[in-house]
Amino acid sequence: MAVFITNLIFFTLPVLILCESSFHQITPLYVRHLKKLEDTLVPHVIARYTKALEDQLVLIREYVQDYEDHQKSLNPVEGNPLDTYRLVRRLALLTGPDLTRLSKYAQDELATIVGLVNIEDKNEAVLSLLHLQYTYSLTAFDLVEGIVSGVHTGVTLTAAHSMEIAQSALHGGYYSFALEWLQVTHKSNKREQRFTDFELLEATKAFTVEHDTNYEVKRAQRHMFIYPQTFKEWNMSLQELLTKPPPSMALGQSELIKTIPDTGAAKREPYSTIALCQGNNFQGNAVRSKLRCYLDYGANSYFLIQPVRVEELGEGLTIFHSFLTNSHVDEINRVAFNKIGLAVTRREASSDENIAAFASVLKNSEPVAWRLKRRAELLLGLNVLGVNASESVRFSLYSTGMKIHKNKLDVILCVLFRLPGRIEGLRAHNDAAGHYDENDPDLAWDKTNYVDRLKTMLIYLSDIDVGGITAFTNLGVAMRPTKGSALFWSNYASNAEDLNPLITHAGCPVLLGIKSYATLWLLWVTIA
């Protein structure tokens, strides 16, 4: 009876007994129980744990392989969207949930990365790449080979990268891009053998189903990335979709092509802005024939020895070439960059947009800002350094796929374009309409006074490899950034009451390179 009770205790409470003592009676019943426990443990627990470790090892090897491939890149181009995507993707692998059981040592070493890069940031990098692809009419077949707008960047993409981009495009509603990246994946996979034919066909099937679901609703909403017909109507096989282009282009692509030669395209948003971002100019010959280019000696005796090259762009929009010397520009970049506030990517409760801040304020008391304002004052013949005459100089910096969203005292928020089925972030705006910084350190006024930005001077502090154009949508003018040059315009019409609709503008995304610039707003203060 005693033996039976002991064995019963071992059978019902094996964990408790094993924890309290290292010695147990090896009875047949106990051995039977251990065997049963092991039979349950191995397939359900150990197998899952082994699979998890193997998956982690695959991710770590993928990270190492991607890093080593990147190190082999020759002369990588700064501000390259492909490089940005691969960098963020690599670091996101290390901070993802699949690697949360890394050793304590590895977790400590990676602590500086966690919180800076995550899976969400990787998804944003993919969406940014897709928007750049549309804005600049890039092909996935070029991008996968590391070619960005004709520039060989040395950073290529694998079949795994292409599949990931295709799936993100499908999830975001960018159907035409999803199909193109699936085709690229199929092509790359012939060499890499990363996916089975079944996996590729299943991904393509999921694409066609998602594209055709609620097709009429999408068509009524003028969805930019659907095709003119459903794939069911085209009756193409999945294999054909992976190897042949569809019979027609996506709606947004065909609209963009129709817009580019259309000189009356100013009302065709967002296509006209995108066409301007690509360097097209919609000004007619009759308008251009009346514009002048000249050397300005007479603005001030200061410019007698070194006159400013002036180019009229229409309706009061002027560009001063070589407004600042290279040494002055380099000094501004150095001082402002050391002050820049880099806000870690974060979510705002009131917004669905992922934002990051890259900007700083240069006060009048700082020599570089005072010199810039004084030079503007002499050239324009306007009060710039006087009391409440202008806001502090704003230094801004942005790169691949980011665009100015709104400004505050210490930061300018840059937003990654993101909205399924549409192109956002390229909307033209006017700098006036009650916009000013009431907390500007260089201003002192009664808050009851009405203040507005009367005139704007935009000073380019860098040359851009590709992209970064300032597009004046209603004028049909595209201005490419040139280091040291300055755009100048009035935000109000000649009656000083109505906003000037012709100088609404948008900053095009940077494709290759990093764009830095300074903004100087001249104010209009009305005493209450």
Image: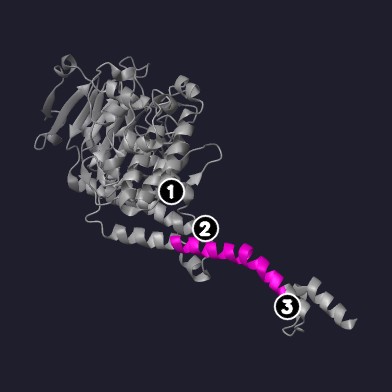
Q: Where does label 2 land, which residue?
A: 98
Figure check: 474 above or below 458: above
Local crowd size for mark 2, using a 10 Å CA cut-off: few (<14), some (14–19), many (≥20) = some
Q: Where does label 3 land, which residue?
A: 31
State which quadrant residue 227 falls in: top left
Tell me where the magenta segment starts and ends, as one range.
Answer: 34-58
| Magenta highlight on residue 268 | no
Specify which label sits upstream in the sequence, 2 or 1. Answer: 2
Specify which label sits upstream in the sequence, 2 or 3. Answer: 3
Looking at this view, name the residue that lies furthest to the left: 305
| Magenta highlight on residue 55 | yes
Q: Where does label 1 land, which residue?
A: 122
- Residue drawn at x 34%, y 33% is 390
Viewed as shown, does residue 201 lie left or right of 508? right
**Between residues 421 and 446, which one lies in front from this camera angle?**
421
Local SS, label 1:
helix
- Residue drawn at x 17%, y 43% is 325
Report the quarter where the N terminus lies. Answer: bottom right
Three-letter code, disc 1: Lys
**Between residues 60 and 470, which one lies in front from this camera angle?**
60
Find the distance from the CA under tag 3 to the CA under tag 1: 51 Å
